[in-house]
Amino acid sequence: MWRSLASNMLTILVVVLFLLGGVIIWGQSQYSSEGPLESAICLRVPSGSNMTKVSRNLQEQGAINSGPLFRIGVRYSDKTDQLKAGSYLVPAGASMGDIVDQITRGGASSCGTEIVYRVGVTRVLAEVRELDPATNRFVERAEFVPGTDKTPAIYDEKKADADTRYRIALAEGVTSWQVVESLKAMDILTGEPGERPAEGRLAPDSYEVSPGDDRATILADMEQRQTLRINAAWESRSDRSAVSSPEEMLILASIIEKETGVAEERRQVAAVFTNRLNRGMRLQTDPTVIYGVTKGEGVLGRGLRQSELRRATPWNTYVIEGLPPTPIANPGMASLEAAVDPDQSDYLFFVADGTGGHAFAVTLDEHNRNVAKWREIEAQRNSN
């Protein structure tokens, strides 16, 4: 009898273990397989939250089918105490495992509100925008000029949120003075910027920042990135280049940057200036004359006067031979590369063509015809 009972108990134990193994396999499959979420959501994990609250939130939003199974998976993966506060973009179909990895890995929030300070050539704008999970695109909520416009209420409101992200977007062609003055106007930053960085030595790029960051430290980061770009561009120079040093490359790149905003034209513009330098011709470019007037401090806001075009300054390339003594702006990587790897062409002239780009010419006669066309376009625009 005892043998029969023992045999039955062993059979039951085997069945139980078999069923338990099946449940574990099923649970693992549910944890790692595609989830029920039909469209992306923004999951906010406030500071002080826990996995129970997060799992309930996820279940209410239809991102998971089972809160208890989610929590078991978290415990099984030993991540119960690794929850990080923030806002997370949970994509459609995300598995429980994917979500757990997101909310325990932390890092920069991938959803929610972003405040962007756009440092442009003509003005600085602060944008408050929020990510729409359904389209994965940002929706602008407010826009203002820091230090000049009245601060919108939503800006102060979002600054109070711990998971709001901040970014400085530095446009190509801004001057070092513009960058420093812009940083001074950003109220989330601290400290004095210190001595203004040399012209051309700041990298146009996007910079993640946080409230309380030091202005001088941010400028140092911008300088470091530009140094790396200058070195990389100089190493990639071609034998068509007319510049003989990284500093000359930086000067020429800044002129290219100010002459065209069309990416496809940079090497063409570079070819014009390279050909002129090789032939001993003056560069005759307006942006350098403007820099001689403004020193990069603000925007001229009007056309150049004939007296300014004739006035001798170190940057007036209608008067001086060769390159000016310093860069006239902070160029981007594409302009740096163009300065040392220009197109192979015979172009010596270019003028605006009315489309945002330029018409290029080899001879003066051809250039004069292009100029005449541009004057007609200008006249038509002024008459409208």
Image (tube, helix red, strand yellow):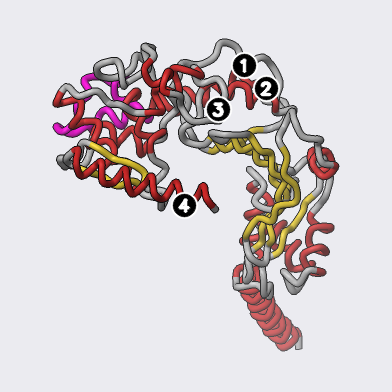
Q: For marks 4 and 2, give the CA distance.
A: 41 Å
Please state which amino acid type lies under the numbered disc 1. Pro
> 367 left or right of 324?
left
- Please name which of the two marks, 3 or 4, marks the residue nearer to the observer: 4
**Residue at 29% across, 47% down:** 359
In contact (CB < 8 Å): disc 2 and disc 1: yes
Q: Report x, y in % for residue 37.
A: 68, 72
**Tag 1 secondary structure:** loop
Image quadrant holding the N terminus, namely bottom right
In terms of sequence position, does the residue under pointer 1 or pointer 4 come before the other?
A: 1
Q: For marks 1 and 4, give the CA distance.
A: 46 Å
In terms of sequence position, does the residue under pointer 1 or pointer 3 come before the other?
A: 1
- Please name which of the two marks, 1 or 4, marks the residue nearer to the observer: 4
Q: For marks 1 and 3, give the CA distance.
A: 21 Å
In terms of sequence position, does the residue under pointer 2 or pointer 1 come before the other?
A: 2
Q: Residue beneath label 3, please?
A: 299
The region drawn magenta spans 229-249
- Please name which of the two marks, 4 or 2, marks the residue nearer to the observer: 4
* Label ID, residue 193: 1
In terms of sequence position, does the residue under pointer 4 or pointer 2 come before the other?
A: 2
In terms of sequence position, does the residue under pointer 3 or pointer 4 come before the other?
A: 3
Q: Report x, y in % for residue 32.
A: 60, 68
Where on the picture, by quarter, is residue 156?
top right
In contact (CB < 8 Å): disc 2 and disc 3: no
Q: Residue beneath label 4, please?
A: 380
Q: Residues within 10 Å of mark 3 (few under 14, many from 20)?
A: some
**Residue at 57% across, 24% down:** 298
Q: Residue beneath label 2, please?
A: 184
